[in-house]
Image (cartoon, rainbow, N blue to C red):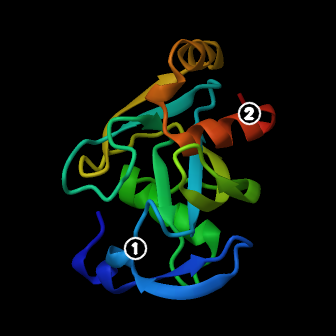
Amino acid sequence: MINSSSHSYKVDILDEHGKPVETKVWNEVDRRKDYLENAFVFVFTQNREMLLATLTESKLSKKIYKGKMGVPAVSLVWQNEDPSKAAERALLHDMCIHPSKLYLLGREFESLKDGTKRLMNVFYCLYDNNWNINTEQLSTIKKIKRVELETLLKIDPDQFSPQFLVAYEKYKRKFPY
């Protein structure tokens, strides 16, 4: 979980080219309007399953896609933080895990269908051990095969976060899945 000292961490606010133009304290960031950099982590098992999370609807959560499905670990990148460190921090915070290796799939500035803007650093990792859900961030995590996920996406894509939809479509051919 994020402790009270994390509220003093600073986050760069970006321009439309992904360059820092301003800095805000983490808890003062407008997650809908500010152009932000994040680390976004897909987690897979050795059995070729993706871990699919449902974001909590808790009022304590800073997540903007409450109740939507997506990856189990997402975090803003703090000022002067390497995106891979932000990804590791997200995995530890949201799932209490330390994967052995993170793989960078790509880094691109995305304009999402809900109007949010993100410089997305998209990673994946393999993890088969136990995890503990941070219930302030996630309500469930389930293992899902590609064919099941593709069916869910066809039936109702609106049940997924816009970031998940963009990243999945862009990188699904690179997954170990």
The kind of residue tagged 2 is Lys
Q: Where residue 148 sits in the image (x, y, percent)?
A: 57, 13
Residue 52 sits above or below residue 153 on the image: below
Identified at 63% across, 67% down, the residue is 84
* Closer-to-camera residue (16/95): 16
Residue ranking furthest to the left: 59
Q: Where residue 37 sits in the image (x, y, percent)?
A: 59, 68
The kind of residue tagged 1 is Val
Residue 91 sits above or below residue 149 on the image: below
What numbered label is drawn on residue 123?
Answer: none
Residue 163 sits above or below residue 37 on the image: above
* Closer-to-camera residue (127/78): 78
In the picture, measured across the screen, residue 107 lies left or right of residue 35, that is right
Identified at 55% across, 78% down, the residue is 13
Alpha carbons under labels 2 and 1: distance apart: 30 Å
Residue 140 sits above or below residue 109 on the image: above
Q: Quadrant of residue 45?
A: top right
What numbered label is drawn on residue 29?
Answer: 1
Q: Where residue 2 sits in the image (x, y, percent)?
A: 30, 68
Mark nearer the N terminus (2 vs 1): 1
Q: Where residue 26 sits in the image (x, y, percent)?
A: 38, 77
Identified at 40% across, 84% down, the residue is 9
Identified at 71% across, 34% down, the residue is 169
Q: Quadrant of the C terminus?
A: top right
SS class of the residue under badge 2?
helix
